[in-house]
């Protein structure tokens, strides 16, 4: 019984083959996506620089709250840049893994 259910699930009723050229405006959408990614990286860089400055100033002035807030900002900004950079390969991997059933 399980084998027949699995066979039905494996055979796709609706095929999905993503294509960048299937709809009009694909070049504009890609340009917008790349622009948003660039702005997100700039925001991440700004957060990292401001966080590092707050961390340094808080450490040198013995202000625990500023140092902790700056440290958090550096870590979050670094993690954001990592996620932004890793997003396309992760999406490709997950889509490819999903089509292997």
Image (cartoon, helix red, strand yellow):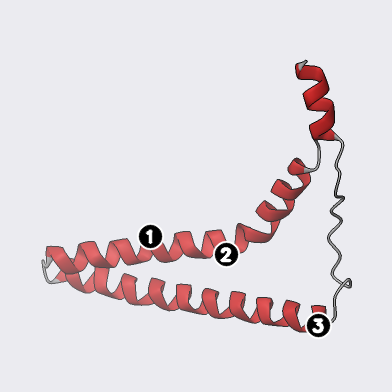
* Residue that lies at the very extreme toward the top in this rendered image: 1
Spatial separation of the CA atoms under disc 3 and disc 2: 23 Å
Q: Quadrant of residue 10?
A: top right
Q: Residues within 10 Å of mark 2 (few under 14, many from 20)?
A: some
* Residue depicted at 61% across the width and 63% down the height: 85
Nearer to us of marks 3 and 2 is: 3
| Viewport quadrant of the C terminus | top right
* Residue depicted at 38% across the width and 60% down the height: 75
Q: Quadrant of residue 88?
A: bottom right
Provide the residue designation for mark 2.
84
* Residue that lies at the very extreme toward the left in this rendered image: 62
Say whether disc 3 or disc 2 marks the residue closer to the N-terminus. Answer: 3
Q: Position of residue 8 (x, y in %)?
A: 83, 31
Spatial separation of the CA atoms under disc 1 and disc 3: 37 Å
From the viewer's perspective, is 85 left or right of 65? right
Provide the residue designation for mark 3.
25
Q: Position of residue 7 (x, y in %)?
A: 84, 27
| Viewport quadrant of the N terminus | top right
Indicate which disc residue 75 carries.
Answer: 1
Nearer to us of marks 1 and 3 is: 3
């Amino acid at each position: 019984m399980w084998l027949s259910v699995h066979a039905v699930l494996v055979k796709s009723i609706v095929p999905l083959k993503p294509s960048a050229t299937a709809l009009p405006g694909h070049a504009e959408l890609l340009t917008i996506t790349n622009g948003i990614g660039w702005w997100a990286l700039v925001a991440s860089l700004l957060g990292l620089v401001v966080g590092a400055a707050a961390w340094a100033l808080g450490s040198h002035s013995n202000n625990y709250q500023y140092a902790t807030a700056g440290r958090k900002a550096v870590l979050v900004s670094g993690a954001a840049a990592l996620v932004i950079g890793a997003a396309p390969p992760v999406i490709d991997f997950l889509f490819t893994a999903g089509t292997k059933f």
